[in-house]
């Protein structure tokens, strides 16, 4: 899963949340996206990973978590 795929999936999920919960305004989402980008930047620095490496690491962790959840 590459960075564009992750961001595309996030945009789809974000749209679904916005439809379901009207309180999630564009302003709220923008603030959350800024927080997420800051968190990702901090993780990149802390772990010494590139943006792509960090996205792959998180995608792998998500996939493993998903598999473990289904195993139970």
Image (cartoon, rainbow, N blue to C red):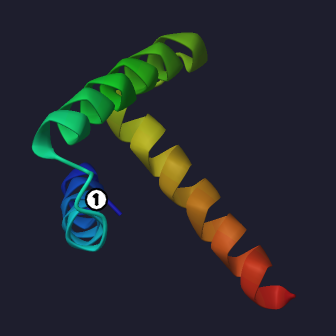
Residue 2, placed above or below residue 16: above
Task: Look at 52% across and 21% down and name the residue there.
Answer: 43
Q: Is residue 33 left or right of residue 26?
A: right
Q: Kindly identify which residue carries mark 1.
A: 10
Of 19 and 58, nearer the camera is: 19
Is 3 positioned to the left or the right of 71 in the image? left
Q: Residue 16 versus residue 58: which sits nearer the camera?
A: 16
Q: Is residue 55 left or right of residue 72?
A: left
Residue found at the very far right of the displayed protein? 72
* Position of the N terminus by quadrant: bottom left
Place of residue 3 in the rendered image (x, y in percent of width and height, measured from the top left)? 26, 50
Mark 1, secondary structure of its residue: helix
Please tell me which residue is depicted at 36% across the width and 18% down the height of the picture. 38
Residue density around tag 1, few if under 14, some if 14–19, many if 20 or more, within 10 Å: few
- At 82% across and 88% down in the image, what residue appears? 71
- Residue farthest to the bottom, as pictured: 71
Quadrant location of the C terminus? bottom right
> Is residue 33 positioned above or below 48 on the image?
below
Q: Residue at x 30, y 64 (%)?
A: 21
Residue 27 on image: x %, y %: 14, 34
């Amino acid at each position: 899963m590459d960075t564009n795929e992750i961001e595309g999936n996030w945009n789809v999920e974000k749209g679904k949340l916005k439809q379901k919960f009207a309180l999630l305004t564009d302003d709220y989402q923008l603030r959350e996206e800024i927080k997420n980008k800051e968190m990702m930047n901090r993780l990149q620095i802390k772990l010494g990973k590139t943006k792509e490496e960090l996205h792959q690491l998180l995608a792998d962790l998500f996939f493993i978590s998903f598999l473990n959840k289904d195993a139970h």
